Image: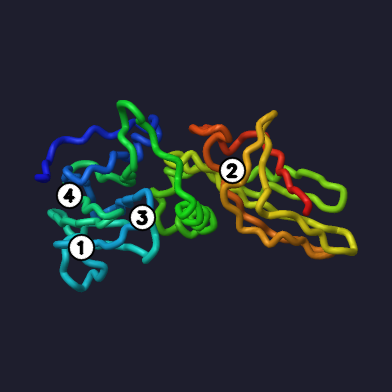
Amino acid sequence: MDLRTFPLIALALGAAAAQAAVRAYPLDERTVYVIHISRAVPTTCVFPGTPTALEGAGVSTQPEDGAAVLLAHQPGADYFSVRALRDDAAGALNVLFRGQVYVLNFATGGEADRVVRFLAEPLAGPGAGPAAPSAERLPFLAARARQASRLAAQFPALTSTVERAAPGTVTPYPRFSVTLAEVFRFEAEDTLVLRLRFTNAGPAPVHYDPARLAVRVGAEIYPAAWADASGAIPAQGGAEAWIAVTGAPGGGRAHLGVHERFSVLVPRP
């Protein structure tokens, strides 16, 4: 099918997000996406997974190459950033993602887009709304949560797409306790990533089943869809675990926020 260029209507993400020039577009291989950049600030593009390849014109990862647009990208990441190197900069990037090629044109002029998020589902119509993330996607979201401080320093605009809270609430058990140290929400994926801190003051190690970790909110239980946990808490010591909770138990979006009253469920073997 022929590519077509037409004005795109950004998804409204609230007043604060609009002021920060955060955009969201459905992925469409027939569309040429026009993205506004500037010399003063980076523009970060986020995909719903890791792109297979990036092919550019007028774009380079090295300033000394003389390209008009500077690209910053880490292998395996689901995002990359671009910045203009001159006032009249223009460049283009073809992004190979899930067997399709998506065309991005960069140009200076007007307010720069700070974050451009590409969604795997349409924004309106039947079946609208982001799909639940795949099991392969959850470790990438957890990696972004783990690197939140570094990403905030390196890509400050990216933090506007992720909510964070540090509740510090404690769920006590007879031989140990678990503290909910941090909660991150990824709105597009309707996913929470939680950092748990276990404490064992007793003389013997405590074992638990990492595959059955869950959180309770009110009367509803949300099993972890992904976990990075050892299953053991050393004697008179501590351990850390990361889990991801996505969607509602019966299907659909759960819309859980980072400020819910969470209890952490830790099943024993």
For image coordinates 32% across by 32% down, the residue present is: 123
x then y, percent, for residue 239: 72, 61
Tell which tag, 4 or 1, sits nearer the viewer. Answer: 1
Above or below for 3 versus 19: below
Q: CA distance from mark 2 to mark 4?
A: 35 Å
Q: Which residue is mark 1?
A: 55
Tell which tag, 1 or 2, sits nearer the viewer. Answer: 1
x then y, percent, for residue 140: 47, 56
Q: Which residue is mark 4?
A: 108
Tell which tag, 3 or 4, sits nearer the viewer. Answer: 3
Callout 1: few (<14), some (14-19), or many (20+) C-alpha neighbours within 10 Å?
A: few
Q: Amino acid at mark 3?
A: Tyr
* Residue 114 placement, left or right of 56: right
Q: Amino acid at mark 1?
A: Glu
Q: Which residue is mark 2?
A: 165
* Residue 8 placement, left or right of 5: right
Q: Earlier in the sequence, mark 1 or mark 2?
A: 1
For image coordinates 72% across by 44% down, the residue present is: 265
For image coordinates 36% across by 55% down, the residue present is: 79
Q: Amino acid at mark 2?
A: Ala
Q: CA distance from mark 3 to mark 1?
A: 15 Å
Q: Amino acid at mark 4?
A: Thr
For image coordinates 22% across by 66% down, the residue present is: 60
Q: Earlier in the sequence, mark 2 or mark 3?
A: 3
Camera-nearest residue between 238 and 37 = 238
Q: Which residue is mark 3?
A: 79
Q: Which image quadrant: the N terminus?
A: top left
SS category of the residue bearing label 2: strand
Q: Earlier in the sequence, mark 3 or mark 1?
A: 1
* Residue 70 placement, left or right of 190: left
SS category of the residue bearing label 3: strand
